Image: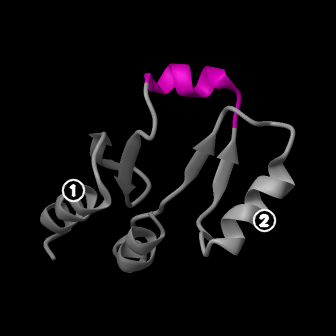
Amino acid sequence: MQPLADKYQDKGVSVIGINSFDQNNKTAIVQKLRDKGIVFPTLFSSRSLVDQLGFNAFPRYLIIADKTRLLFSGFGTIADLDGVLSEQLGH
């Protein structure tokens, strides 16, 4: 996801990770992500947020542009998501 975050950040797309499984090791998880070059933000949330969003399998992607416009919700590869973004944003 980091390549997509980098590629589309100037188009108003933000990538945010959601971790609802491990609330006790936030610092270690963020450090592990940083060590792998993943620098987009991670939201640590209770399982209730995931349930409210209707996520029942992982990884699940929501792609939102300009803070309000839902471009995609579902599953796919990075290439699939890049195609959706390219099509939706006119690349």
Which amino acid is tagged 2? Gln
Measured along the vertical axis of the image, is residue 58 above or below residue 68?
above
Q: Identify the residue position indicated by label 1 in the image.
A: 80
Verify whether residue 76 appears in magenta. no
Which amino acid is tagged 1? Asp
Q: Quadrant of residue 30?
A: bottom right
Element under label 2? helix
Where is residue 75 shown, x and y percent of the image? 30, 40
Q: Which residue is at the front of the view, 34 or 68?
A: 34
Q: What is the quadrant of the C terminus in the image?
A: bottom left
Q: Quadrant of residue 35?
A: bottom right
Residue at image location 59% in from the left, 69% down from the top: 38
Q: What is the quadrant of the N terminus in the image?
A: bottom left
Q: Judge the density around disc 1: few (<14), some (14-19), many (≥20) Cα neighbours within 10 Å.
A: few
Q: Identify the residue position indicated by label 2 in the image.
A: 31
Measured along the vertical axis of the image, is residue 41 above or below residue 10?
above
Residue at image location 59% in from the left, 44% down from the top: 18
Q: What residue range appears in magenta?
A: 45-56
3D distance between C-alphas at marks 1 and 2:
28 Å
